[in-house]
Structures are given as C-alpha cells and as structure tokens.
Amino acid sequence: MCHHCLGHEPNGVSRREFFAAAAGAGVVGGFLLRAATAAESAAVTGSDEPAGEWPEVRVAYLRQKAKFWLGWPGTSWENRAYPEFMTKSRGLIEKFGHQTKVRVNFEPEPLYDDAGAEEFIKKIQADKPAGVILVPVHMHEWGRVTKIAKAGIPTIVYAPLGVCFTGHVRPICREKGVHVISTADFEMTPVRFGLKMVRTHHEIRRTRIARLAGNETKDEVLEPFGVQLRRLPRAVFADAFKTIRDDDADVLAMVEDYQQAADKVVEPARQDLINAAKNYFASLRILKEHDCQGITMDCLGAVFDKQIPCPPCMAWSKFLDVGVPAICEADINAVMSHTLCCKLLDKPGFMQDPVPETVNNTLIGAHCVCPTRLNGYEKPRETFMLRSHSESDVGVSVQVIWKPGQEVTVMQMTGPGKMILGKGKVLRNFETPPAGGCRTSVELAMDGPADIRDTKGFHQLFIYGDHVSDFEAYAQMYGIETEHV
C-alpha cells in the first residue's frame, strides 16, 4: 500500500478505506501491490465472488390454507396481520441476504400440507442449497418443520412469538444441522446471524492458509471444518523477505503509521520496525504467489535458525486487524480457531499461552501477537505499545492493553470437529518486566472450571464480547462437538 493509503490518523484507517485506497495502488516496491492487496481484500470481503456464486438459501413459509378460528397465533394475527408479516419478513430476509452475501430464494407458495412439505424436501435434496429458512406461521406446522429439518440441509427455523411452545421446539432444537430461533424479535435480527453462519461456512471452505514449516509442499483440507491448508517450506518466507528493500516506500509508510499510532515505542529501534514491516510485505507476496488468504509459520524456528532477523509479530497483528487469519507457530488448531473467529464475528481473537493463577483461581493469557482492533475491524484500535519479541528481544511485538471489566469469550478448535468454549472478564494487564512471558499479558476471571488448573486447551483465543452462543450455534449447524473449557 502506498504511503497515502495507510494514513496517519491515531487509530489508523478503516478496513473499507484501506481496501479502497489499495485498489488504486500501482507498482510500488518492485512488485504489483494491487494484486497482493486484492488477495487480502477477497479473503475479508468476498469481493472477488460474483453474486451468482454466493451460497443459496431457500426460504419456505408453512401455514394453514383455510382460515381458522382457534389456536396460536390467533385468528387476529393469522388472518389480519399475515399479509403485512409476509411483506415485512420477506423484505428483511432479502436485506439480510444482501448484507451477508447469501442468495435468498423464496418458495412461490407457502407449504400448506404434507404433500407440499414432501415436494419441498425432494427439491432441496436434489438441488442441495447451502441452507434452508423455515418460517412456521401456526403451531400446527411443527411436524412438517421437523421433517424438513431432517432432510440433510442446514436449516434455520424462525418461529416468531405465537407459533410455538417449549414442547414444539424441544425435539429438534439441539439436532445437528438445525438452528431454531424462537423469539419475540419481529425485526428478525437473529435470522441475519443464521445467514452469516451459512456465509461463514461457505467462506471457510474457500479459504486457503499458507503454512510455512519444515521442507514439505503439500495441499490438504481439514475436514469436517473445511479450511484448506497449503504446506510450504519455511525457507519460502526467508526468500520472500529478501526481496523487500529497507527503503521501500510502503515499508517506511507502515513504520511511520505504527510509530504514530502507538502509545509509546519501548525497545524497538528503527531497523527493528523496518524489519517488522518487511515481514508484512513478504507475507503479502506469499499470499499472492500461492493463492492463499491467510498465513501461519514456524516463526520461532525461523528466528532461532536466523533465517529472518525477527518474528512476524507486528505483521500478524496487522493482518488480524483486517480479518486475515495470521497464526503463530504453524499451529493448525489455531488456524481453524482464527479462521472461524475472523469470518463469523467480524473481529479478531488473541491466541495466547494459558497460565493458571492458582492464588486467585484466574487465567492469565500471554503472547507476542495480538490484534489491536479487538472490538471489530471497523472499530478503533485499543491502546498499544511497540515492544520487542519477548523470548528473543528482537523485532517488534504489539503489546495491547485490554479493558478491565470487558467480557471475553474463550474459544479453541481442538481438532477439525471439536471446539472448547468458555467465558470470563478482564481483570488486569501485566507488564513485562516485572512479569515474565509474552508482551500482551491479560488476566481473566473465568466462569469455569471451578479449579482453574483444570482449564482445557492451549493457544485458545480470547475474544472481546460474549459469543459462546454464537459459536455453539455454528458448531451445532455444522457438526462440531463442543465442551466447556
């Protein structure tokens, strides 16, 4: 990106401005930045995908054909308010589809009876859309809802207040492949999240992550999660780094941006900042040349063997701030965790090494890579300082200050079909020194386990906000097992 593209506001430019400016960039620093940035932008926005290729969701309403005078939702709602409900709900679903980049196609007529439901099942099993939305408009429709939900297509059921009791919802609400929304929200906001899940699953299966470790070159898919992995020799990164000049205008612009945005610069000298920025542009080159939308590397090994002068901590933080998965230590589970978090929540997570604080029964998480836009890609950065990488004392790590009192979700994919979840609240940040460990270091009061020493996982993500139910819904929809952290 050119010097102008990066901007110099204290909180940087927005993601939208970043990509818009980058689209106009020319050949800078010896390679076509426009192409590299397009790969990055596509990973985040899906801008390279025509609307005709968006995932398709079929929408069907289920209701009684004849007017009735007894039963929920009641004759006044069913017979008088139904046309208005149909018009409004269709408009909202269409709007949500456009916002989430999902093609929404409505059945021309409601499903009035068993024959209509059976015909609909045959169609979706033959056409295999990415998902189905069912809207029952009477409590007697739940038998047909259940049949359709068992047809093998991910199904979102929107049940507005008045069309169900607990007994209707209970039999299917925890079935795999189903997301039941029983709600008094007639603005249908939860339906938008349902479509976001469909979009996320589609994007994950189109995402390829470059993994640079060892000497192997190989492609694989992590099923059932769906993300693609492109294994590349670790030396590929060192080779790309050598192509980026110290006096590259884009490198110097990135250095200036981070110097101005940081609360302070502690250990890093100017050459450290230049090397950290070169890591970012070397990574962009790799994404472009290998058709990848995210990156992970055996970074500690590369630094230990002196293949590169410093780890890519600042580069990874910058990628995460715009929604591009960038993962430390070639950790495949963390690849899946970051990819899901970035795409489902539109905000990055912080991968950390967990430490039990046994005196206070709290959990401390620390690492040298942390995104700054913890509230979301379009939101302001949190306060941060530029530090050295803790273990090596070289390069640039972004030490981010977490807000005390902030709710936090703890999530980790522990395999392609397994997820652990929990939540906590930020108590405080730690400085290094006097503390040892990595630069961003934050303590959480957790909702469990009762004994913090029993906490499951390693390299879990800390994520701003309470998103446990969001991850649980996605996991249920796409066959991922969950357990408490």
Image (spheres, rainbow, N blue to C red):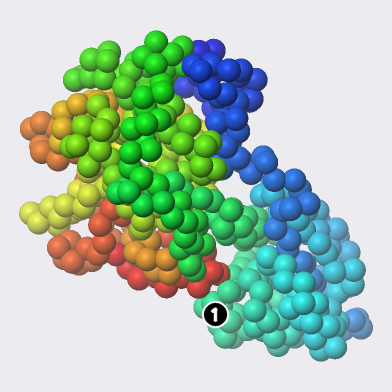
Circle 1 packing at 10 Å, graded few (<14), some (14-19), many (20+), is some
Using residue 97 as the reference point, say whether residue 314 is left or right of it.
Answer: left
Q: Residue at x 59, y 74 (%)?
A: 178
> x and y percent of residue 278 in the render?
37, 23
Using residue 284 as the reference point, say whether residue 194 is left or right of it.
Answer: right
Vertical placement of residue 213 versus 413, above or below: above
> x and y percent of residue 439 in the render?
21, 34
What residue is shown with label 1?
A: 175
Q: Residue at x 36, y 56 (%)?
A: 332
Q: Residue at x 83, y 64 (%)?
A: 106
Quadrant where the C terminus sits is bottom left
Q: Nearer the viewer, residue 214 or 408?
A: 214
Amino acid type, label 1: Glu
Vertical placement of residue 95 versus 149, above or below: above
Vertical placement of residue 320 versus 465, above or below: above
> x and y percent of residue 108 in the render?
90, 68
Q: Nearer the viewer, residue 334 or 199?
A: 334
Using residue 79 as the reference point, say whether residue 340 is left or right of it.
Answer: left
